[in-house]
Image (cartoon, rainbow, N blue to C red):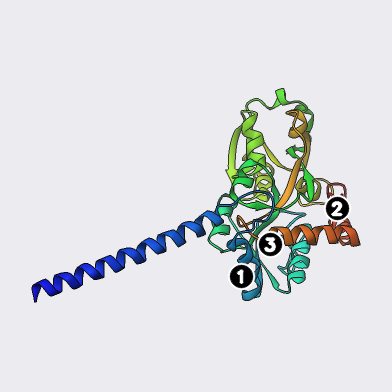
């Protein structure tokens, strides 16, 4: 009886090991396809399934932060802005609804890979780190980082040499933080770009580094921060080219190519420029 049980147990273990081996092989292939990166869509099973995943649930979840004029809320709490409006149009082209999800910018890749969001669409600067972590769309907008200071102190900050000793508010994980750190400035990381302006206005930071597009929309005459202005374009000061914005999708996602086709169509029919004019970003939008 004991010999019979031993033989049965051995056969069971062999079958179990064979099943595990097959499972590991399958898992390895899936993992390999999901690790595909680059600026375009991949051709893996992950790429083939991502658009269908969004269509099946009927919602495109867009990861954003409060970043005027790209994504911000109107008086009724609805998300508007250049990026928000284009995201709505893209979702409509897919035949699904759009849902906006505020995220912590530092965790955007984690949110994307966990499928808490389906894309990152928030004036995201395309750089090597982003391209390594996501499938990134063709660029659709140009931008730069600028130094924001109290208007009555603007004449004190006209060159990079004038910035020594400044305490600068930056959005954590942003291109603004990278630009400030590259200059050796003391940074105060905050959660949102809009929070950097509160820091300067309250006097808790000497200056802020934010996107030029946001500066144009949120500071100066006729805004809530009429006492602030910007002086230096830090891209130019460091001899850098303008930044490019892109939309980030999961690695290997076929949504990337779907977006690129959508954007090309929006440029061709004039709707991209019309939306850009609505939010004052017509000089930055890429229409070629």
**Residue 98 visible to an observer of this rendering:** yes
Q: How many marks?
A: 3
Comparing labels 3 and 2, the label whose residue is closer to the camera? 3
Q: Quadrant of residue 256?
A: bottom right
Residue 137: image x %, image y %?
A: 72, 53
Residue 97: image x %, image y %?
A: 70, 73
Residue 172: image x %, image y %?
A: 59, 45
Relative to residue 255, is residue 182 depicted above or below? Answer: above
Give the camera-side residue of 201 and 6. 6
Q: Which residue is mark 3?
A: 255
Q: Which residue is mark 2?
A: 280
Neighbor class of circle 3 (other Cα within 10 Å; few <14, some 14-19, many 20+) is many
Q: Which residue is mark 1?
A: 53
Q: Which numbered tag is attached to residue 76?
A: none
Q: Is residue 131 left or right of residue 215?
A: left
Q: CA distance from mark 3 to mark 2?
A: 27 Å
Relative to residue 159, is residue 139 depicted above or below? Answer: below
Give the camera-side residue of 18 and 101. 18
Give the camera-side residue of 65 and 127. 127
N-terminal of the two: label 3 or label 2? 3
**Residue 227 visible to an observer of this rendering:** no
Q: CA distance from mark 2 to mark 1?
A: 34 Å
Q: Is residue 51 left or right of residue 242?
A: left
Q: CA distance from mark 3 to mark 1?
A: 10 Å
Neighbor class of circle 1 (other Cα within 10 Å; few <14, some 14-19, many 20+) is some
Neighbor class of circle 2 (other Cα within 10 Å; few <14, some 14-19, many 20+) is some
Residues at discs 3 and 2 in contact (Cβ within 8 Å): no
Q: Quadrant of residue 186?
A: top right
């Amino acid at each position: 009886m004991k010999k019979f049980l031993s033989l049965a147990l051995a056969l069971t273990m062999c079958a179990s090991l064979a099943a595990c081996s097959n499972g590991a092989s399958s898992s390895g292939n899936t993992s390999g396809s999901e690790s595909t990166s680059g600026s375009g869509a991949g051709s893996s099973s992950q790429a083939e399934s991502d658009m269908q995943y969004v269509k099946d649930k009927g919602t495109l979840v867009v990861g954003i932060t409060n970043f005027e004029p790209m994504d911000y809320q109107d008086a009724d709490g609805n998300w508007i802005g250049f990026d928000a409006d284009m995201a709505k149009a893209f979702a409509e082209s897919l035949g699904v609804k759009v849902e906006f999800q505020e995220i912590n910018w530092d965790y955007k890749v984690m949110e994307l890979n966990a499928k808490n969001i389906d894309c990152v669409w928030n004036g995201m600067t395309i750089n090597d780190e982003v391209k390594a972590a996501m499938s990134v769309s063709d660029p659709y907008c140009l931008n730069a980082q600028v130094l924001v200071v109290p208007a009555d102190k603007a004449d004190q900050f006209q060159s990079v040499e004038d910035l020594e000793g400044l305490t600068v508010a930056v959005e954590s994980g942003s291109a603004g933080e990278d630009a400030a750190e590259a200059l050796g400035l003391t940074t105060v990381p905050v959660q949102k770009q809009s929070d950097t302006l509160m820091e300067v206005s309250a006097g808790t930071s000497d200056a802020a580094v934010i996107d030029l597009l946001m500066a144009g929309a949120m500071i100066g005459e006729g805004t809530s921060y009429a006492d602030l202005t910007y002086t230096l374009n830090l891209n130019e000061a460091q001899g850098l080219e303008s930044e490019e914005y892109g939309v980030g999708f999961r690695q290997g996602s076929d949504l990337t190519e779907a977006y690129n086709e959508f954007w090309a169509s929006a440029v061709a029919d004039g709707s991209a420029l019309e939306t850009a004019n609505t939010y004052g970003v017509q000089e930055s939008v890429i229409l070629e």
